[in-house]
Image: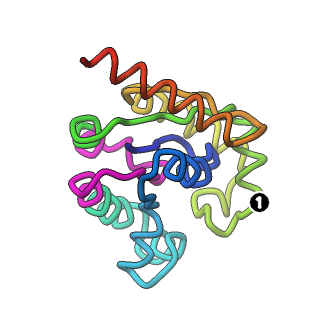
């Protein structure tokens, strides 16, 4: 199972709780990139640029998707890549955590150092632009769940219910 969506949508936080709820391991693709590079994801992004970061991200996500069943939180741009999106939709159940830009703006202000695309720009404007650009790709996920302000366990329960419906429809 893979969580996709913009930065601040709750992929890592909700993903950890979802993994516990389902009794599965959890992995964050950004953490995997950091382990491989010996740098934070933000440092990799700044030092090597977005293109090299995305190339590494693509390889890490492919490795994770081909591994054992688990809950995977991807970086916000991972699902935008056509090949990565096709692979994830083939190998995994993909869940788009969709959140309003206002909420994303608030959440991403909490740890700005982990958001390299937002450090030198107007956060709300950049998130609105990314939201408009990426929505068509995110909409190709198997499941869309709204991530709202409030308790994360509610989002987890909506995901679990949506997964159950998705699996019933497939059988």
- Report the residue at 69% width, 42% height from top: 152
Q: Quadrant of the C terminus?
A: top left
The residue that mark 1 highlights is: 110
Q: Position of residue 149 (x, y in %)?
A: 77, 37
Q: Secondary structure at mark 1?
A: loop
Within 10 Å of disc 1 (Cα), the crowding (few <14, some 14-19, many 20+) is: few
- Compared across the picture, whether 116 is left or right of 38 comes to right
- Report the residue at 74% width, 39% height from top: 103
> In the picture shown, does residue 117 fall above or below 161?
below
> In the picture shown, does residue 104 fall above or below 160?
below
Is residue 76 highlighted in magenta?
Answer: yes
Q: Which residues are magenta?
A: 62-85
Q: Position of residue 144 (x, y in %)?
A: 50, 26
- Report the residue at 37% width, 22% height from top: 166
- Compared across the picture, whether 73 is left or right of 125 comes to left
Task: Name the foreground residue: 70 vs 80.
Answer: 70
């Amino acid at each position: 199972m893979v969580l996709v969506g913009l930065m601040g949508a709750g992929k890592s936080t909700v993903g950890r709780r979802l993994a516990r709820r389902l009794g599965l391991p959890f992995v964050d693709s950004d953490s995997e990139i950091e382990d491989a590079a010996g740098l934070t994801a933000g440092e990799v992004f700044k030092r090597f640029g977005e293109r090299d970061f995305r190339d590494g991200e693509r390889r890490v996500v492919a490795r994770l998707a081909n591994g054992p069943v688990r809950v995977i939180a991807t970086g916000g741009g991972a699902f935008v890549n056509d090949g990565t999106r096709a692979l994830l939709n083939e190998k995994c159940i993909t869940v788009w955590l969709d959140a309003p830009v206002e909420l994303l703006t608030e959440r991403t202000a909490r740890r700005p150092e982990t958001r390299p695309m937002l450090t030198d720009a107007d956060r709300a404007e950049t998130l609105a632009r990314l939201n408009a650009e990426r929505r068509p790709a995110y909409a190709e996920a198997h499941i869309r769940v709204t991530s709202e302000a409030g308790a994360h366990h509610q989002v987890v329960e909506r995901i679990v219910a949506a997964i159950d419906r998705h699996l019933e429809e497939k059988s």
